Amino acid sequence: MSVLCPTLLLCVYGFFSNMRPSEPFLTAYLMEPDKNLTETQVVNQIYPVWTYSYLVLLFPVFLATDFLRYKPVLVLQATSLVVTYVMLLKAQGLLAMQLLEFFFGLATASEVAYYSYIYSVVDSSHYQRVTSYCRSVTLFGSALGCLMGQLLLSVAKVQLVHLVIITLASAAVAFVAPWFLPMPKRSLFFHNSRGAVGARRHSSTSYVEKADESESKVPLNSSGFSTTSRSPETESGTRSLMEVLRLLFDDFKKCYRCRPLLAWSLWWALATCGYLQIVNYAQPLWEKVRPSQDYEIYNGYVETLSTLLGALAALLVGYLPVSWALWGELALFVFSLLMAVCVFVMGTLNNIWLCYSSYILFRAIYMLLITVATYQIAANLDVQRYALVFGVNTFVALLPQSLLTLVVVDSAGLGLDVFTQFFIYSGYFAFISVVFLIAGLWNLASRRRSEALVNNPSESSHSPPITDST
């Protein structure tokens, strides 16, 4: 029951907070006569606020999540979503919509509480199962919301404002769930008991010590890690902010010394930056190609299908007979290049069906690769360091995204039209593919040199493996 109750409440919260029928039609709704906003205002002045807010709030919210022990930040996220959709329904004007984007950025930054709360209240033997439940239900809620919105719009002929009302009602239901969650007694950094630290001290041998990853022998979940060498005073009570920051920095340095983790994290950050730009500005592109005031639009079907295909692609990862340690970088090269082609087609061929198809393929590829990246990163960590590494990766992704937004999208920068933006984004993904082509070729060359040394022992000088000194 101690596992069932919080898991069920988290699933209810994740489902309803992500069931947003209005989401695929947000651009069309903001450009309706009722809101009376222009395309330039929506694309170049309103949407960029979300990116900046997300970047600025991510690290403070990450620290607050651990210090407040998750539940209060979940309540904050639920409140931010309700405020967002109340403002979307009632507020008018450019400044109000920019403030709305700030609250949505706060809600997005608070997602770290949702995915890390469960690790503080259930035993580690249940981590994998409850994580899969929480992630699956949010994906299902998102797909169902998009499909519901499209059916209501196409079949029932409802107005877009009614979809916003339904989304607000869903957010209101989600708002109730976090209040009933049990309050954790510990957290990963600020409130970590001696017993919890001791458990981390006796973690099993690191996954990075696999034979096919011999170039990165770093015991990331062994007792050599910095979190296990704290004083009794620190271990038994609440740590200060400076102690936590020092702890985070030590963990950060040791995590990213692992070459596979660094490579997959680099792709995660670079690709997520481009992915967020594509997802954020796909609707304005579709609105340009097929104006919603003149034609029936099918954004809901597209979002539903791309989400479900992405989920299917993620499930297929476990069945792909690929040695990611050997061919991972070259696979990232091929798929990143394919993503670049999809974005190029979306931005240059003025055909809504090609736009839709390319978007679906683009999202499916990203979902496939981000699942592989998540697994490869997780294989080099113990579960208690997921929040740190994934948080750092997200923060690094937001840095170039904010720069891209400021220079390319924001009216304070170049304020380019959406077609030119997508041309630039396609070049961005082509750049990613080139980076990983070089990394893949370097990896293959390094392995061949290593094999040559193994075949000629007289030319090699073996050093003893890294062992635990404690």
Image (cartoon, rainbow, N blue to C red):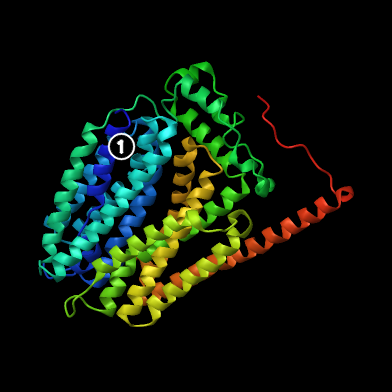
Q: Position of residue 185 (x, y in %)?
A: 35, 24
Q: Answer whether residue 276 is visible to the viewer in this image.
A: no
- Secondary structure, mark 1, is helix
Residue type at mark 1: give it: Thr
- Answer few, some or many: residues within 10 Å of disc 1's Cα (few below 14, many 20 plus, some between 14 and 19): many
Residue in the picture at 56% in, 58% down: 321
Q: In the picture provided, is 74 more to the left or to the right than 203? A: left
- Residue 279 sits above or below residue 344 on the image: above
Q: Foreground residue, 415 or 365?
A: 365
Frontmost residue, 27 versus 102: 27
Q: Position of residue 434 (x, y in %)?
A: 58, 68
Compared to residue 426, the image places residue 14 above or below, namely above
Q: Quadrant of the N terminus?
A: top left
Give the quadrant of residue 312: bottom left
The residue that disc 1 covers is 7
Classify 200 as above or below 438: above
307 left or right of 343 in image: left
Left or right? Give the position of 275 relative to 438. Answer: left
**Res 467 quadrant in image:** top right
The residue furthest bottom is: 350
Q: Position of residue 204 (x, y in %)?
A: 58, 31
Q: Which residue does the image show at 16% across and 44% down from the upper left? A: 173
Q: Quadrant of the C terminus?
A: top right
Spot occupied by residue 85 in the image (x, y as percentages of width and height): 18, 53
Vertical comparison of 374 with 229: above or below? below
Image-quadrant location for residue 20: bottom left
Camera-side residue of 379 and 232:
379
